[in-house]
Image (spheres, rainbow, N blue to C red):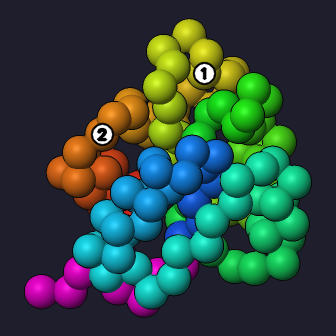
C-alpha cells in the first residue's frame, strides 16, 4: 500500500525544535518526500512564496506571535493545512475554525488521521 504522504512536500511551521524533530520523524514514516521547516513567521512566508507545498502544519503560536499571516498565505495559495497547538479552541480565528487542530502533545495516529482527512478533502 502506498504511504499516505508518498511524494508529497509538507511545510512544517514550528518554533520548538524538539516538537519539529518529532513531526519530521512522523512525516517521514508516512512517506513524505520532503519536509521543509520554518521557525518564524517571516521564514514561513518566504518559503510559501517561493515553493509549492502539498500540505502544511502550522503552530498557532510562534514565539509569542499568532501565525494568522502564515495561515492567510497558505489559504491564498490553496495549500491545505492543519493547526498544531498547546492552546484551547477559543484561540481559533474567524474563518479558520473549520481547520483541523492537533493538540500537543499528539500521537502518530492522531497526526495520520488528521492528514488523511486533510488530503482526501
Question: Along the horizontal axis of the image, is 57 left or right of 94?
Answer: left
> In the rendered view, would you say 83 is above or below 32?
above
Task: Name the one closer to the observer, 52 or 117.
Answer: 52
- To which residue does mark 1 refer? 92
Q: Is residue 52 left or right of residue 111?
A: right
Do we see residue 115 in this rendering? yes
Left/right placement of residue 23 relative to residue 49 reads: left
Rounded to the nearest angstrom, the CA distance separating label 2 from label 1 is: 18 Å
Residue placed under numbered mark 2 in the picture: 106
* Residue depicted at 31% across the width and 81% down the height: 31
- Residue located at (62% from left, 34% from top): 60
Image depth: mark 2 or mark 1 in front: 2
Element carrying mark 1:
loop
Q: How many marks?
A: 2
- 62 to 8, vertically: above or below: above
Q: Quadrant of residue 77?
A: bottom right
Q: Position of residue 91 (x, y in %)?
A: 61, 16
Measuring 23% from the left and 81% from the top, which residue is drawn there? 3
What stretch of residues is rendered in magenta?
Answer: 1-9
Query: Which picture quadrant has residue 49?
Result: bottom right
The secondary structure type at the circle numbered 2 is loop
Residue at the far front: name it: 18
Upstream in sequence: badge 2 or badge 1:
1
Q: Quadrant of the C terminus?
A: bottom left
Amino acid at each position: 500500500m502506498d504511504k499516505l504522504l508518498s511524494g508529497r512536500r509538507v511545510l512544517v511551521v514550528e518554533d520548538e525544535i524538539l516538537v519539529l524533530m518529532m513531526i519530521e520523524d512522523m512525516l517521514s514514516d508516512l512517506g513524505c518526500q520532503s519536509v521543509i521547516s520554518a521557525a518564524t513567521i517571516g521564514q514561513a512566508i518566504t518559503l510559501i512564496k517561493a515553493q509549492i507545498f502539498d500540505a502544511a502544519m502550522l503552530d498557532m503560536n510562534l514565539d509569542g506571535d499568532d501565525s494568522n499571516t502564515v495561515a492567510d498565505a497558505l489559504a491564498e495559495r490553496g495549500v491545505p493545512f492543519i493547526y498544531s497547538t498547546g492552546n484551547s479552541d477559543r484561540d481559533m480565528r474567524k474563518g479558520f475554525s473549520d481547520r483541523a487542530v492537533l493538540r500537543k502533545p499528539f500521537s502518530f495516529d492522531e497526526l495520520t488521521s488528521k492528514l488523511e482527512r486533510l488530503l482526501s478533502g
